[in-house]
Image: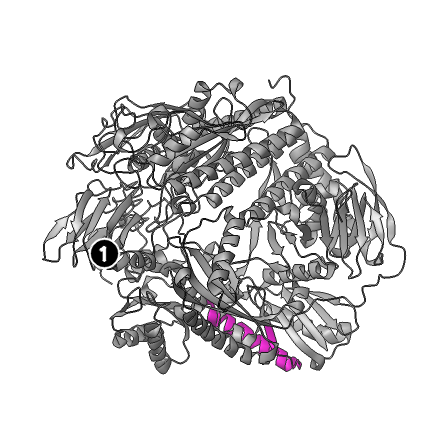
Amino acid sequence: MNMQHKIDPITLEVVRNKLDGIANEMESTLLRSSFSPIVREGLDASASLFTLEGESLAQAVAIPIHLATMIPVVRRISSEFPPSTMEEGDIYLMNDPYLGGTHLPDIALVMPIFADGRPIAFAATMTHHQDVGGMAPGSIPTNATEIYQEGLRLPPLKFRSGPERFDETVIKILRLNSRIPDTFMGDIHAQVSACTVGAQRVAELARAHGGNMMQALFAELLDRSEQMTREALRKIPEGTYTYVDYNDNDGIDLDRRIRIEVAVTIRDGKFICDFTGTNPQVRGPFNVVPSGTQAAAYYALRTITGAHIPTNGGCFRPVELNLPEGSILNPVEPAPVNSRTATIKRATGAILGSLRGILPEIVGADAAGEMLALMFGGTDRNGRRYVVGELIAGGSGAGPESDGVDVIETDATNCMNLPVESFERDAPIRINSTRLRRDSGGAGRQRGGLGIEREYEVLAGEVVFTHRGERHFCPPSGADGGESGMTARSVIYRAGGEEEVVPSKLVTRLFPGDRVLILTAGGGGFGPAADRDRDLLRTDIANGKVSREQAKEIYHLADD
Amino acid sequence: MIEIGVDIGGTFTDVVCRAADQPLRVMKVPTTRADPSRAVLEAVRQLKDQWDIEPADVARFVHGTTVATNAVLERKGPKTGLLTTAGFKDILEIGRQMRQTMYAAVLEPEVPGYLAPGAFRHEIGERVAFDGEIVRPLNEQDVRDAAASLVEAGVEGIAICFLFSFVNPAHERRAAEIIREEYPDVALSLSCEVDPAFREYERTVVTTFDAYIKPVIDRYLANLEQGLGQAGVPAPLQIMQSRGGIATSEVARQRPVRLFLSGPAAGVVGAQMVGQSAGITDLISVDIGGTSSDIALIRAGEPLIRPEGHVAGYNIRVPMVDVNAIGSGGGSIAWIDTAGGLRVGPHSAGSEPGPACYDRGGEEATVTDASIVLGYLDPDYFAGGTLKLRPELSFRVIEEKVAKPLGLSVEDAALGIHRVVNTQMTEGIRLVSIRQGYDPRDFALLPLGGAGGIHAAALADELGITRILIARHPGVLSATGLLSAVVEHETSLAFPQRVDELSLDDVRAALGELDERCGGLMRKERVPPEDVEIRYFADVCFVGQSHYLEVPFTPGEDAAEQLRDGFRAAHRRVFGHAADAPTQVVNLRAIHRAGGDTITDEAADAAGGEARKGTRRIIVQGHEGHLEAAIYDRERLAPGTTLAGPAILEQADTTTVVPPGWSIRILDGGNVLLTRDGAQG
């Protein structure tokens, strides 16, 4: 194709900037017009443009876990509905993880973009919907043991024929399966609006350049990002690098740690992630279909190859994945998958961790890499039902030149915490403290970031409490002689005086006077603790980040 | 009556003078970074020499300052303490746990912990519940001990931020009282006064920033007041605030966190006034600087305000004009990536070394160098001739850095650089307006900054905008904005009540309290009550949502209907839909304003003489080869003149490129309107 269409380098760069702008406009439309707070405030949605071959041209992502996860969706849809049979205004939809989706709440919509009377690209959006049915409100049941319990499964479907005709049958099924049909359909229509904006603007661009030229430009953009990525990879020493890390358990078999093992090979401009040795699939919902690990690998690759490379499908061509069938990263249907995030985070951390030895300035020590999910549900004094959820981070890993950051989101996720002043208004629960967790950062020449201490006290009524933690048993490693970050720990102090240590995952009931103390993990330290600058250490003591005891015992600070 | 506006920029401090029946006068003096007040006082000294103005005749003196922002950027504030509720010492450093840089594993802090590091943060025994009930009384001894220890450590300012103080401020106020008794010289910032709204991290940040910059602002303004007094200026010093209203120095010093966007706010007010004098109420202003461009929207004659802004990389919850920066400007560098593609930015040559043609050692091809190659700039008349440009250097860098690697002519390479940077700017403008629910085609474009006029027509063409307004003095728009701004005071309080259960008595009582506070500030301004215009707003959201929209209302019998309908209309505009769901009020706000007027430049008559200076060959996108463009001296074009592109309008502080297909009209007020041919003008 490139032979026939001479590419003007200026037009190429103009079109690239336009495609990025269009993806951003789609994302902005998606976020603005969605109904549910999880989309609007959790930013759990993404918008992309794809080639007909299913490679991403431009993507606006708010959370890395969405990065390129729509690739298998678009490929699946275009294999079931060949683009040559598509008409302008058609919209296709699906969510099933075993057919290319992620988990059931994430529904993808795909719309062909037409120029010169034929499709030249796709506009696609994916939104985490608040409820798609299944055994628990919110459609992320932590006690699911098969996908059928997780909600409505949608194979690739034609949702709209042409610009007007929605499939009423599909709409009726969607509405009937959600606990909140109006919000659900509102969010679906936000996806329709975003796809429409994308399709219209790309079609407008194509009118100026012609459909064939547009496709030639797309191909060139992908080739160039591929070329730049391979060049960046060639600058990294060739070899195979391995890493093993663990998650705590799957919430069902509490004493069984989950092993994530990876061998990353960098050779000939390729980036091969082989997860042989990784845990078999688990009974609980922590399994991940391949698109999730793909996002992990893409995230790691973008982190090590540099911001100057325009992100598109070309960047991902060097990636090869080996995900053993029947493992937690390539489960066999009908394994449950809704709580996949913790596993994707650990896979991302493991890929990065394997490269630490050769890229210490980019990778640093391990981050806590935990996103503690808490859920409190019950009835308040006025008989009103409430559910309040929280996502809480630990510390980031130290780099060779800088301390880790305290309590911050890392790797594949990026969520906000909940203000005390919002939490206490919504639930009859008081928060007694929110502090940095002293001494939790891995000691080192550069110290790991600190985790958090937060204590909740039930004031009234009975509370159903869900705790989905990580790093309770396996700490984030230090680097280059640095110490591990402190493991996470959560304890329930019952009103009667008993103490219950939370085994990372737990569903239990709380009663008035019960308190829950959560302590998240710190990041790993970098370099030997003995090498830490003594003035920095004294500042840490003064600021309460390191205790005198730790300074003495681990940093060997002489008495002042 | 003589009025002076002084705006401090990075390089120059701009001074404008307005006197009855006189043309607006403009002067630039070099900015003195170490102590910006020196440049201001220097300007005052020059009033007499340059314009024969006696300082004693100055009746108004309005100032836009960057001191607040600089103190934060340079981290030059004094040691600052923070008192928190027991158990919550580290709210400031925990933040919201999100990161801005997505693809990175070695991270930087996202929170301004440096304002008050752990050693300067003290926990105070006290607790207020969400409904205002006191769960644990204030431990006064804790306050005394904390204050003693902080003062001992050399702290100059203390921020107090307790949980739920926006519902019940008693503990914060009492703690402040205790500290004032013992240490009257310590600057105090109370969260219940600075930002009485929910979300403890955001409130702590803004309150701590307030305490951190208060001593700096205080010293600066005191110096300036003293200097003006000694120079014999009798007028009280007035300061521009971030929302676009002015306040006397005395009031501004009490609320320093409201000064962060002092300069940019003045620019937006200036743009608003230019629109007003041209009868255009909907404007997008684009200020194209060296490293970045600032975009702001003016809708129905009023600048858009955002409830929080970004300063030095931090989100600070204080209302300010909605100015959005994008990372493309005249100094943006064009480069070739490792796959051989052309890229522009995000790196910039800034003003030092600047574009190659500045001949200050710049070795990179910048957007400004491309402008030289395209014939847009007169090398001998750049910045009114104050900086002599060397065009051959522009040709050389573009040849070497861009044209040769891409196999293009120098001219095509330069045009390519412009096409790419214009695409970046148009996508930025689209996103800013679409996020607010506005279609850019419904707006006129108002270019600012030295390079605004060069790109304006290309941007307008791309955006489907058909009108461009060029200000008479675009280079000093901030300073002129200072003179036309209103005196404004804004106060707010938390008011959590459902709209369908709204108690009008409660609303009126709350507004009464806000009016009392604003009224107190206005009395300090010596503004007579009858001159004050009062507006009320409510932040409203759907029940259960945490993001709200501001809705104007009046506290009449139909207040609830106004809030509900106003909120739905705003929701529909910004979000495209409005559910029939219950709504609730979050905060109430009162805005008191007085004065302000349009600058109608009395003597907008043209300078005499021949306006046409000759022709220059320019290259314009969408037109083959070179075009002969007529060059006009903008100062000599009389109101009512109409011309057609291709043309170039030159004036001391800007150059405007008018491609074929655009018409020029000089307006009565001295501004210039460009209209796309065939559009409704």
Between B481 and A27, the one lying in front of the other is A27
Query: Badge 1 local density, few (<14 within 10 Å), some, or many (20+)?
Result: some
Q: How is the image coloured?
A: one colour
Tell me the kind of residue under disc 1. Tyr
**x and y, in percent, of residue B408 in the image:** 70, 29
Counting the numbered discs, the total is 1
Camera sees residue B360: yes
Query: Residue shown at 21%/40% (left/top)?
Result: A474
Between A456 and B423, the one lying in front of the other is A456
Between B229 and B189, the one lying in front of the other is B189
**x and y, in percent, of residue A408 in the image:** 35, 48
B297, above or below A503, in the image:
below
Camera sees residue A300: no
Answer with the quarter of the image where residue A66 lies: top left
Query: Residue shown at 37%/46% (left/top)?
Result: A415
Q: Image check: A85 left or right of B378?
A: left
A53, above or below A40, in the image:
above
A249, above or below B431, in the image:
above
Name the residue carrying label 1.
A456
Q: Which quarter of the rendering shows the N terminus of chain A?
A: top right
Answer with the quarter of the image where residue A357 lies: top left
Find out whether residue A370 is within the magenta segment.
no
Q: Image check: B230 left or right of B628?
A: left
- Label 1 SS: strand
Find out whether residue B236 is within the magenta segment.
yes
Q: Which chain is disc 1 placed on?
A: A
Q: Image check: A134 left or right of B47?
A: left
Q: Main secondary structure of the magenta part?
A: helix
Q: Which quarter of the rendering shows the C terminus of chain A?
A: bottom left
**x and y, in percent, of residue B72 in the image:** 48, 61
Magenta region? B213-238
